[in-house]
Amino acid sequence: MLCGIVQTTNEFNTNGCPNCQGIFEEAGVGTMECTSPSFEGLVGMCKPGKSWVAKWLSVDPYIPGMYAIKVDGRLPGEVVELLPHYKPRDGSQVE
């Protein structure tokens, strides 16, 4: 729910999130608490650093891969507290 990368449940369980694992560990939460099987839209990023779509989705600093446009669910508060500029990927806004 943080970066929007799309992987299988097995990949998340085995390797964690390739973009966000350090943040989850710092917050003391498990990867599966920060993932959602429910998303809308899918974008493939080969060169995120050079893509206007990646910048629009705020995934330009991340690794190449498949990213969800919108992800249903909310991150645990422990993770959100570490991210002062966090924008939810579910379309809502943080107050």
Image (cartoon, grey):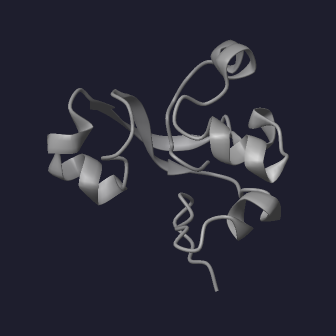
Decide: is 65 above or below 91.
above
**Residue 55: x, y in percent?**
26, 55
Looking at the rendering, which quadrant does residue 38 occupy? top right
Looking at the rendering, which quadrant does residue 35 occupy? top right
**Residue 92: x, y in percent?**
57, 72
Decide: is 16 above or below 78.
above
Total marks shown come to 0
Residue at 68% over, 64% down = 82
Seen from the viewer's position, the closer of residues 9 and 16 is 16
Q: Quadrant of the C terminus?
A: bottom right
**Residue 16: x, y in percent?**
67, 26
**Residue 14: x, y in percent?**
72, 13
Residue at 65% over, 36% down = 21
Could you tell whether 53 is left or right of 38 in the image?
A: left
Residue at 55% over, 42% down = 39
Decide: is 19 above or below 95.
above
